[in-house]
Image (cartoon, coloured by chain):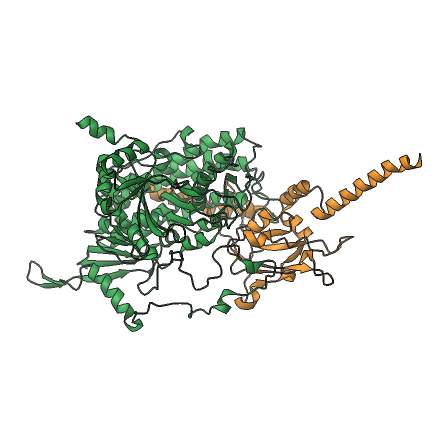
Amino acid sequence: MYGQGIARGLLVTMKHIARSYMDDIRYAGRKYSGEGNFGTRQGMQATGSYTVQYPDEKVAVPERFRFIPFLIVEDHDHPERPGHDWCTSCGICAKVCPPQCIWIVRGRNPQTGRPVPEPDAFYIDIDICMNCGYCSEFCPFDAIKMDHDYELASYDRTSAHIFDKQKLSKEMSHWKRIAPTTALEEMQARGGWEHMDIIREKAKAERAAARARKSAPKQSS
Amino acid sequence: MMDVVADKTQLDISASIELLRERWPDAISHDNRDGFSGIIVDPAQLDDVALAIRDELGFDYLSSVTGVDYLGIADHMEVVYHACRTSGGPALVFKAQTGRDDPRVPSLVSVWPGADFQEREAYDLYGIHFDGHPDLRRILLWDGFDGHPLRKDWQEAYFEEEHKPFDSRWPGGQVYRAEEKNVFGKNVRYPDDLDLGRLNDVSESDLYQGLGLGVDVQALDSDGLRTDRLVVNLGPHHPSTHGVFRMVVTLDGETIASLDPVMGYLHRNHEKIGERNSFLHNMPFTDRLDYISSMSNNLGYALAVEQLLSQGARYSPPTYRAECLRVLMVELTRIVNHLWSLGFLLNDLGAFFTPMLYANNEREKILDFFEATSGSRLMCNYMRFAGVYRDIPERIRSVANLVNDKVRDYNTMDYLTEMVNERLPRFLDEYDTLLTRNEILRERTVGVGVLLAEDAIALSTCGPLLRASGVPYDVRRADPYSIYPELDFNIPAGKNGDIYDRFLVRFQEMRESVRILKQILPRLEQSQGEAVVTKIGHTPRVPVGEAYGRVENPKGELGYYVVSEGDPKGPQNPWRYHVRAPSFINLTALGPMCVGHKVADVVTILGSIDIVLGETDR
């Protein structure tokens, strides 16, 4: 019969409308507030339509979410090297960057002029960054990571959108907070929460100490 | 006699080449360069050879036409053709070489009409003249553009170096912004003989002349009234054009007399960028082609480069789990894309946003999974050469950011299982009830925009557009890749080739994708723990050669023609990086499909092709 298809379609839309209002009743005014309501209504079981009341409400971003990179520095309350850069200015991130938005000035010892493993300056032009995540993926020192902060509006793109080292640097504890699982995996691969170089140095020192302990009794005998 | 003819269309590639070589021993030679395949045809005989390839050998489908500039290597231009059979099998590659000073090759539009836009593109970007082309104008760039940008000696305004990575970035990287050195507005070069004042007049009048205007605009209708044909510009800024896309139509009353698509408003010379990039750099750029289905774009490019890499000594193909993950992602992408395209098709028809938003609800759920796995919803950048970025996460939501979102912290496999086994089939049934038998939809779409099977093949259309015309041609079956040979699925095909059939084909394809996904889930369970991250570093040594990687993108056949010529110690970047974009080539059929219909139908016909301008304009 002509019109049957339309009628069936309208029934479907009616069902959706009803469900949306059912939600209002079910949550009794707490539709957009209250512990768990927001999440339930966005989960797999949700049936009605919903609106995320941005910026009052925000959809949580997953751990691997990638936005503008940041540089990891040691926590400011770190006992040995507070605030120290993890970056060794090896330049791999600048090489793998597809739009070439990373500029690094390699650090030099002012007395000898020899390169030292830390950057003198580090810039990212966030207008050009395409958030691909290659820099953090290929960094051998886990020193550059993708951030979760996507609210970067500013009044002047010509000056505010070039991030320098100070703006880019964030504490290691920030990375542990936004990506606990990934940070843990990386820690296991490195062998500790310290920077890879520190871990290696400590292991080397331990081995040397062990050798010294082993050889010490021999000498005395 | 009939047997012989039938046999010839079954010959494999090498036998076909031998047959052609016997016929034209002087005009055809093997392409013996290292890593290259196919034949090189003398341009003088190209017409005849192409006809024989099409009619006698049965390569009825011209997949791709593109140019390559071998400046500094062989100092000639080359036009590369990939012809396929709609019955399946790999592509026959043939090439025509011509000098760089006045590159000329006969046009093959008369043999394969689908070469039309692709030859115009090669003319636009390389300056290769195709003799006999009916309408050889620039297609992506504007008429006053100086030079042909894909030529190796052409440099862009912001030119810094031939290849990335640029030396200025490290170790002495003092930041500057490109536009400080090359101020916007002063970065355009014009040809010497260009009269800027008349620029618009000339290009526009050329366009209108091509439509037959200015020749005979007045005619007498049956009542003796003088009537005039009217030119209407649809777009470039119009919601129904799905982007910055323009259609110049000539109207006879309200009926379309002719239609000419005008594109390139979003052109960024993706291919030139790709040739400056290293091989790996290109991966996130492919996301930006068809930004609705970035996962499939990634896969096509990965396949092309893997073909090259597999010629090298140290290369191990992706693991089984990596292949499963790839298929999982591209099939989810197919559903995402078809949900999007059906929703917008209904929008174009005037079913304002209800079907769109219902479809988007499901799409969001899939994008949530993409985001949790790859880190981004649209620009996934997930595939790597011989692997993928990372395995799927254990939990789909991290515990870190769940201040107000504890309920969504799912186990990822549970999430996927629920989505594939329950949510998606349930939704597809509901969507079916909502739309498929709707009388208004049927009246607007049945018999509108008909494309016959032989026209669809001749015009090189692909994807749901081709299959709705009754040609069950799908690269997943015709030239299988990844683990598709072991998966069980059907290729839905239409009968009438109208908009309604395209709607049904897309719908069926979503159901088939769900079927594939159901087969993928147990494979993922079994292969748990297998490594998926590739050991190939960020600068793989890519052997010299050519490769054509093609995949069945949701929108059609997506092909990447990649040539590697770099010396092993030099910069590792593609010499040629060409994208055979399905949206772009499908538009060849837009004009013929629209003629005779009303203005309101043009919008729907365009919607049924399902274009994305990021890919069309590249």
Check the image and name the residue furthest to the front. Answer: B26
**Could you tell me which residue is drawn at 36 percent across and 35 percent down?**
B479
For the C terminus of chain A, give its image quadrant: top right
For the N terminus of chain A, give its image quadrant: top left
Q: Position of residue A38 (x, y in %)?
A: 55, 48
Q: Position of residue B611 (x, y in %)?
A: 34, 50
- A108 and B270: which one is in front? A108
Count of marks overlaid on the render: 0
Q: Please state if B462 lies on the left or on the right of A111 as rendered.
A: left
Q: Quadrant of residue A190?
A: top right
Looking at the picture, does residue B15 appear above or below residue B121?
A: above
User: Is residue B578 visible to us here?
Assistant: yes
User: Is residue B448 visible to us here?
Assistant: no
Check the image and name the residue furthest to the right. Answer: A221
Looking at the picture, does residue B58 appear above or below residue B287?
A: above
Q: Please state if A23 lies on the left or on the right of B108 as rendered.
A: right
Check the image and name the residue furthest to the bottom. Answer: B197
- A9 and A75: which one is in front? A75
- B600 and B18: which one is in front? B18
- B475 and B5: which one is in front? B5
Q: Position of residue A6 (x, y in %)?
A: 30, 43
Determine the colour of chain B.
Answer: green
Q: Please state if A123 lies on the left or on the right of B23 as rendered.
A: right
Determine the colour of chain A.
Answer: orange
Q: Please state if A34 lies on the left or on the right of B136 as rendered.
A: right
Q: Position of residue B261 (x, y in %)?
A: 28, 56
